[in-house]
Every structure is written in structure tokens, then in C-alpha cells.
Image (cartoon, rainbow, N blue to C red):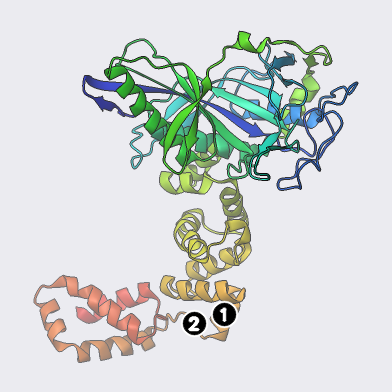
């Protein structure tokens, strides 16, 4: 839960938020045609006769799109409706050649489900919270108007016309921008784990319509506005913050909030009116006469369920059971690529706790510095496991491991080869270490006298001087034991 409030002149206001997320289904074709869906293609090069609404063309449902939507529903533990139906949503727009959108209003493919957002102290989310999801329905996308191609005309690109979307509709359960951001990140993670959507908000394959209203705490729900097509988590949070404050100002000045559709301007962080909000009856919904209802059998549902991977919550719990901290487990499972890399690291024999600490600090830090994604890491999981193994068996120290890792990043060489080539193997030779300790104590008589006089904090100084004299190659555990003996 969060304690987020808008402080107005008449007191505190609560924000009520619901999100309608449009997620493009990962598929090799559109919802009702065989046209391709690759991002960035030349305008109007991925358009079938069905997408262009040529007379006599009939839609045929893409089985893979339905399968991915069902798998997504199962991942949020939702009701899967064996019987569902397509409806026509009628409206005119230049990029909608049919004059209607095929969607699902009355009988969606997926019913109620939920997901849980985790506590986040930095974001002000004190405890985990369950966010209810009302439905997931499948629908086709519209095309796109291009306003920057001609001084007096807009051009139409129908490449997106007919692309399969899942509309994932939450209940109005969120109460702060931080909760909405956490919900969107978690939903994106689940979609990417399942493989039903790539979650690429910059390319438009996932975007959110943001419903916001305000009310005095514990009063009835206020009138909501809907801010359309917001395409990043940060922008969703900004839109909520701006829109909530705007509504409070309107209400406190004696006005009323209009139920309307708004647009978000990412440059200014503000919203503006787009059009008055339509209700369902304005679209004259009716069952699509060209499409039979969808009827799913048990064999299809069983196959969908069996194909699901280990999901973020289950993976995080498994990591924590291995002794990994809750924070590290959360970081490692936030993105599916990171979790897969970590699983490969464990499969290669790395000790879980040490591996998690190394990956969240050393590896992520290096990738951030290099500006690279984990899928493009210069060091693979098997190489990393070998490096960690050399530390675990005492071949090299932790500080030497950092040097070896830097060389691995530059050269791609394996850790063992680097250690041998550069003579970095750690020594546990007690005679050699004792000789160096004797030199260190002889060179630092003042510190030795202070230590023996009770200044025990100087023990670390002697450890550091010994390790420095041995160029970091001494086994720290042996150094500690021999120093304690030498210092008496």
C-alpha cells in the first residue's frame, strides 16, 4: 500500500487509477490475415486484402494469437473462457479502412485475474499489493496517419492495420503513480517471460491508456478521464501525477471534471483534451457476422498451460530458497533475459549466493558502463561460473577476480587462462606469507606499538599492507590467521 495523497486547498485527495494496456501479440501474422508484422517496414508493405478492407474479403482467426492470449491469461491466474465472441466496434477514422474494429466487448477470451506488485521502499510502496485484472480481450489494431510527409495532406500507413492486440484491463485498484509504474513493469515482465509480447514500449508494441479520477478519501468514485496511448512507464507516472493535480484544481475551483479522452505530451509532462469520452453504445457494438464464436477444447487449454515457463514470482521464491537476498532475487527476476542468464550461471555450477552478488554488482555494473544489454555480454555464463569457481576454491582472491573480469571483458579469454598467463594464482604458502608479514611489522614499528597498546582497529592496516606487498596474491584467510599469530 502507498500513502500517496494530493494536497489541495480543501484538504487531501485520493487518486484512483486503472490501466488498459494494449500489448501486441508475438506472432508471425496479423489477427485475421497472413500479413507480416515486422517493425519499421516501409509504409503499406505489410497489408493484405483483408487489412485493406477490400470487398468480399473475410477474416480468419490466427490460432497462434488466440493461443498467446490464453497463455497470458493463465500466467495471471485468470478465468479462461472456453466460449468467446468477436464484436464490431463501429467508428469512422481515416486509418480504419473497414469503418469498424473487430474486438470483444461482451464475451472476452479471458476473464478476471490478478498480479501482485512487490514492496518498494524507494518508491514508497510499503507492502506487496494484489492488483485485480478485469479481463483480457483480443482485438485488431488500426493503421497510422502520417502528418509529416506532405505540407497539406496526411498520408495513411496500413502496416499496423489488423495487428493482433491483447487489451489487458485492470480494475481501479492503484492509488499512486508508483503503484501504476510497478504494475506496468510487472505486467511487462510477465508478458516477456510468457513470450506473448516483446514489451517494447518505444516501438509501440505495448502502450497504456491511463484512467485517472480523484476523490476525498473513502468517498464515492469521481469522474475519470482516459489519457490515450502512453508509451513508457515513466510517462504513465507523469501523466497520472499531472492529471490528478489538474482534476483537484478543477474541483476545488468549483468546476466539474469532464469524462473525456486526453493526450499526454511527453515534452511538457502535461495532458490535453482530445475528445469527449464515448460510451459503449456510441460505438454500436454488435456480434461480427463474419466470425463464428471461439470455442476452446480441453486439449488446447492443456497444451497452453504446459507451455508456460517458470514465471517471475515462482522464480523469485526459488532464488530466495537458495539463500539469495530478497532484493537480489527481485533484481535478477525483473527481466527475463537476466533470469535466464542467472539460471545458466547456476547450471554451470556457480554457488547461488556468491553468483547473485557478483551478477548484480560486477556484471550489471560492467554492462552499464559498456552500454550493453545482458544478451550482448562479452562474458558468458559458463565463463563467469569458472571465474567464481576460481575464487571459491582459493585459486584467486576476490580483488584479483575483479582484475581478471576486466581482462575477460576486453579479450573474451577464459578466467583460468588469464590467471595462468599473468601469474595471478593466489598463494597459500605460509612460509612466504610469514616472511612478508615479518617485513611489514618491521617497517611499521609505530603502528605495531599502538596495536599492542590496545588499538585493535590497526589489524586491518596490517592486512592491507601484507596484501599490497604480495600484489593481492596472498590468500586473505591465511593472511588473517598468520597475522593474528604474529601480533600475539
Marks 1 and 2 close (CB-CB < 8 Å): yes
Residue at the spot 51% in from the left edge and 73% down from the top edge: 406
Q: Is residue 1 visible?
A: no
Q: Residue at x 62, y 73 (%)?
A: 412
Q: Secondary structure at mark 2?
A: loop
On screen, 379 above or below 183? below
Element carrying mark 1: helix
Residue pointed to by mark 1: 418
Disc 2 crowd rating (10 Å Cα; few below 14, some 14-19, many 20+) is many
Q: Residue at x 16, y 83 (%)?
A: 448
Q: Is residue 446 above or below residue 248?
A: below
Residue 431 spot, x, y in % from top left: 37, 87
Nearest to N terminus: mark 1 or mark 2:
1
The quadrant in which residue 420 appears is bottom right
39 sits left or right of 211 in the view: right
Q: Quadrant of the C terminus?
A: bottom left
The vertical placement of 59 against 154, above or below, is: above
* Tag 2 residue: 424
User: Residues under labels 1 and 2: Cα distance?
Assistant: 8 Å
Amino acid at each position: 500500500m502507498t500513502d500517496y495523497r494530493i494536497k489541495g486547498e480543501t484538504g487531501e485527495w485520493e487518486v484512483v487509477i486503472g490501466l488498459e494496456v494494449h500489448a501486441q501479440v508475438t506472432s508471425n501474422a496479423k489477427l485475421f490475415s497472413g500479413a507480416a508484422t515486422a517493425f519499421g517496414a516501409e509504409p503499406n508493405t505489410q497489408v493484405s486484402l483483408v487489412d485493406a478492407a477490400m470487398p468480399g474479403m473475410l477474416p480468419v482467426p490466427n490460432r497462434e494469437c488466440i493461443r498467446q492470449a490464453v497463455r497470458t491469461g493463465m500466467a495471471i491466474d485468470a478465468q479462461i473462457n472456453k466460449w468467446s465472441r468477436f464484436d464490431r466496434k463501429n467508428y469512422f477514422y481515416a486509418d480504419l479502412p473497414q469503418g469498424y474494429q473487430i474486438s470483444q466487448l461482451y464475451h472476452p477470451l479471458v476473464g478476471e485475474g490478478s498480479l501482485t506488485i512487490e514492496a518498494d521502499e524507494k518508491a514508497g510502496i510499503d507492502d506487496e499489493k494484489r492488483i485485480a485484472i478485469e479481463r483480457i480481450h483480443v482485438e485488431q489494431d488500426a493503421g497510422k496517419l502520417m502528418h509529416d510527409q506532405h505540407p497539406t495532406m496526411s498520408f495513411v500507413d496500413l502496416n499496423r492495420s489488423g495487428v493482433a492486440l491483447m487489451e489487458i484491463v485492470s480494475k481501479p485498484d492503484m492509488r499512486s503513480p508508483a503503484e501504476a509504474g510497478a504494475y506496468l513493469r510487472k505486467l511487462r515482465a510477465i508478458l516477456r517471460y510468457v513470450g506473448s509480447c516483446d514489451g517494447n514500449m518505444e516501438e509501440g508494441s505495448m502502450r497504456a491508456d491511463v484512467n485517472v479520477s480523484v476523490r476525498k478519501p473513502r468517498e464515492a468514485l469521481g469522474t475519470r478521464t482516459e489519457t490515450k496511448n502512453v508509451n513508457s512507464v515513466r510517462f504513465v507516472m507523469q501523466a497520472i501525477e499531472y492529471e490528478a493535480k489538474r482534476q483537484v484544481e478543477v474541483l476545488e475551483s468549483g468546476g466539474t471534471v469532464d469524462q473525456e479522452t486526453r493526450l499526454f505530451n511527453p515534452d511538457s509532462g502535461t495532458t490535453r483534451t482530445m475528445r469527449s469520452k464515448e460510451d459503449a453504445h456510441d460505438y454500436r457494438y454488435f456480434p461480427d457476422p463474419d466470425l463464428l464464436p471461439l470455442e476452446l477444447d480441453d486439449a488446447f487449454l492443456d497444451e497452453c498451460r504446459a507451455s508456460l515457463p517458470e514465471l517471475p514470482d515462482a522464480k523469485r521464491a526459488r532464488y530466495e530458497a537458495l539463500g539469495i537476498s530478497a532484493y537480489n532475487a527481485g533484481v535478477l527476476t525483473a527481466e527475463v533475459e537476466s533470469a535466464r542468464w542467472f539460471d545458466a550461471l547456476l547450471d554451470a555450477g556457480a554457488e547461488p549466493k556468491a553468483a547473485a552478488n557478483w551478477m548484480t554488482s560486477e556484471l550489471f555494473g560492467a554492462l552499464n558502463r559498456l552500454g550493453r544489454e545482458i544478451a550482448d555480454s562479452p562474458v558468458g555464463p559458463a565463463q563467469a561460473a569458472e571465474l567464481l569457481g576460481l575464487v571459491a576454491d582459493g585459486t584467486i582472491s576476490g580483488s584479483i577476480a575483479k582484475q581478471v573480469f576486466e581482462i575477460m571483458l576486453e579479450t573474451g579469454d577464459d578466467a583460468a587462462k588469464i590467471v595462468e598467463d599473468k601469474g595471478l594464482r593466489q598463494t597459500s604458502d605460509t612460509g612466504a606469507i610469514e616472511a612478508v608479514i615479518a617485513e611489514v611489522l618491521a617497517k611499521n614499528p609505530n603502528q605495531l606499538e599502538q596495536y599492542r597498546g590496545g588499538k585493535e582497529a590497526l589489524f586491518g592496516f596490517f592486512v592491507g599492507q601484507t596484501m599490497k606487498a604480495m600484489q593481492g596474491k596472498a590468500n586473505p584467510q591465511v593472511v588473517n590467521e598468520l597475522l593474528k599469530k604474529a601480533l600475539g
